Amino acid sequence: MSGQATPSRAGAEGAPILSTRSLTWGVGGFTILEDIDLDVGRGEFLSIIGPNGAGKSSLLNVVSGTNVPRSGSVELDGHDITSLRPAHRVRRGLGRTFQTSSLFPGLSLVENARLAAQASRGGSLSLIARPRWEDGATQAGLAALAEVDLADRAADPVADLSHGDKRKLEIALLLCSEPEVLLLDEPTAGVSVEEVAPLVEVIRRVHERGRTVVMVEHRMDLVVDVSDRIAVLHNGRLLTVGAPDEVMADPVVQSAYLGEAA
């Protein structure tokens, strides 16, 4: 299996919902991603692992539109989105979280969610008006908060949340745009040991409700537990893709990643 990606689950069961073809990106004279060919099946949970500096977050940046590739393409549900801005990709059904939070700490959870719902609907981002509980954006926000187990804290300020609950809120804000594909970048980074399990349960539930999840994560026990497949990046190249047990048993993966992390 080493050195060659296994056929994607999407290839056997239908067209992939997300694909990259010969995707290459770098900064200046440095190439950070090189010739990445990756298919993600509809409804799949794919985790991306690799050593520090392997290009994991860079890959999410290019897929989400934050960075423009030097060459290659990104396709979402059969449509080339390589030239689209991040906001347009969101409207096509692609959502993304980052390693660092981008919340409004002085506002309540529901106000944050309302703003996310307004943005996804093409409305204005009004920070002045208080949310009206009956309007569509607020109702969408409340539904998203309920899905991540934060409905009972809707009126609380974000500043009062623990780090784990802030991660849940970030996922709720993604759900406000009704994404088909969620890109999660190190969702458990900085989260306390006690809060990891509830956060993972939220991520698992979001996936089980029919959404596709692509996750960069460093906790290997979590990756093995939740993933349908694992993709391994090393030195900016896709080393292999396969079922968790196959990938973890691969001697090249163990040498390139697991051994390096030990």
Image: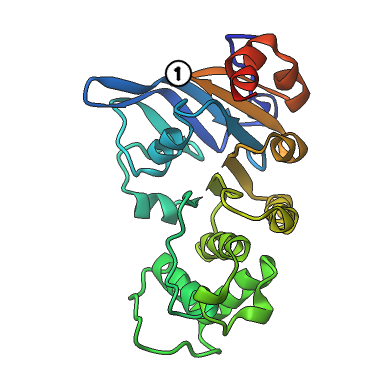
- Which residue is painted at 70% across and 20% down in the image? 247
User: Residue 1 occupies which quadrant of the picture?
Assistant: top right
- Classify 54 as above or below 125: above
Q: In front here: 168 or 261?
A: 261
Q: Which residue is mark 1?
A: 235
User: Is label 1 in a helix, a strand or a loop?
Assistant: loop
Query: Count the marks: how many?
Result: 1
Q: Position of residue 161 (x, y in %)?
A: 58, 71
Q: Position of residue 162 (x, y in %)?
A: 60, 67
Q: Does 71 sit left or right of 207 as displayed?
A: left
Which amino acid type is marked by label 1?
A: Asn
- Which residue is painted at 45% across and 51% down in the image? 92
Quadrant position of the C terminus in the picture? top right
Whether residue 249 appears in this view of the structure is yes
Label 1 neighbour load within 10 Å: few <14, some 14-19, many 20+? some
- Which residue is painted at 31% across and 48% down in the image? 85
Q: Does 126 sit left or right of 90 as displayed?
A: left
- Classify 64 as above or below 120: above
Whether residue 79 appears in this view of the structure is no
User: Residue 255 occupies which quadrant of the picture?
Assistant: top right
Q: In front here: 11 or 165?
A: 165
